[in-house]
Amino acid sequence: MRVGLVIYGRLDTLSGGYLYDRKLVECLQRHGDEVQIVSLKPSRYGRCLTHNFDSTLFNHLRDADYDLLLQDELNHPSLFWLNRQLRPFVSYPIVSVVHHLRSDERHSPWLLPLYRTVEQHYLASVDAFIANSRTTRISVENLLPDQRPTMVAYPGGDRLLPDISQHTIVARAQKPGPLRILFVGNLIRRKGLHTLLAALEYLPARSWQLDIVGDPEVDPTYVRRTLQPALRRLDQKHISRHGVVSNWTLSALYAKSHVLVMPSEYEGFGIVYLEAMGFGLPVIGSTAGAASEIITHGKNGFRLPPHNVLALAKHLFLLNEDRRLLLRLGLAAQKRYQAHPTWDESMESVRGFLLEVASQNHALQRQTNKPTN
């Protein structure tokens, strides 16, 4: 297949969504498919809307010799109108890779209707969808007036190839010392690090140790105005800030931690939840979004309402005091990871879906005698 992929910026950008896109590209190329990256300049939402009237972008997509055009749904403000303008000139189908909808996030009441309208128009301009969870698929379907071909392909959790025995998980849980808490995620408000920091204020400083992994440059205003004051209120001896780390360093942090905490306002899936479970870590996530498809409350972790600082503090205190509970949750987390599809398995299923969409489109073009690219 000849495939185009529209993204913002670089494919090696550090986030779960870009990891998903990279794994898909690797799978396609492994099968000999040709993938052309169409990179749009990342910018503020309003400026991205102007991409719809970029003649250079329009002409490139109009003249491209694709069997299929993939679009990361994150790019919806740049494409919601442009896709419609392309329709009379192209015969390839457009497939959107949806990690989560912007309109499912928390926004100012006066902005949310704009985001929902633009996103709805974008979704209506696409022929088929790849969703990273059942929750994401339902969100897409709820915004569409009709059904489109859609598949759910979960992200894998085996990127780091965890190799940790049950004996190691037992020894780690039983070792005396503070509860080792790990946060992994870009330092943006949606990921909820401020909620975790607020919860730690309720716990004795000697009872916890926090490792923070994440890019502080994605939203420097949030870091400066919210995180830095919250961090100053805590004992710095118990906090390690790592920034962006290598896979080897991240694996080491997973291996020595007791629990992953990422109390997000919303996650379309939450790849780090699954990666942590591969190292036998119970996970504390949110009741919002798709965390329920990974975390079974009370079995391999906990799901708490977003922003519920006291509930989070209570559960962290419980895990530190009851190491048998910590161990039981950790062993169950590892079993949950082992039952999950690998990246290769998921991306192979996506490629099969794309082949079917492209084949059906070619058949339709032959029936209508419309020339194909």
Image: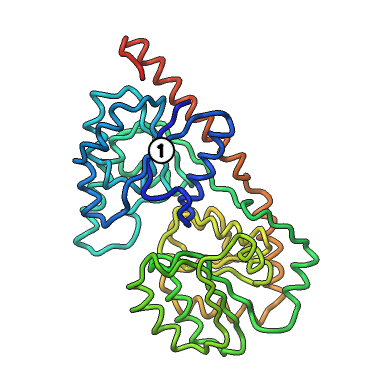
Name the foreground residue: 271 vs 35: 35
Instruction: Give the residue number, with chain letter if any, for mark 1.
Output: 5
Mark 1: few, some, or many residues within 10 Å (few <14, many ≥20)?
many
Q: Is residue 189 visible?
A: yes
Residue 185 in the image, given as x and y percentages of width and height: 49, 64
Residue 360, located in which quarter of the rendered image?
top left
Residue 190 in the image, given as x and y percentages of width and height: 39, 65
Q: Residue furthest front?
A: 56
> On the picture, is 229 further left or further right than 322?
left
Residue 177 in the image, given as x and y percentages of width and height: 69, 84
Residue 248, located in which quarter of the rendered image?
bottom right
> On the picture, is 142 further left or further right than 207?
left
Q: Residue furthest right?
A: 167
Q: Is residue 329 visible?
A: no
Query: What's the amino acid at mark 1?
Result: Leu
Position of 194 relative to 19 (above/below)? below
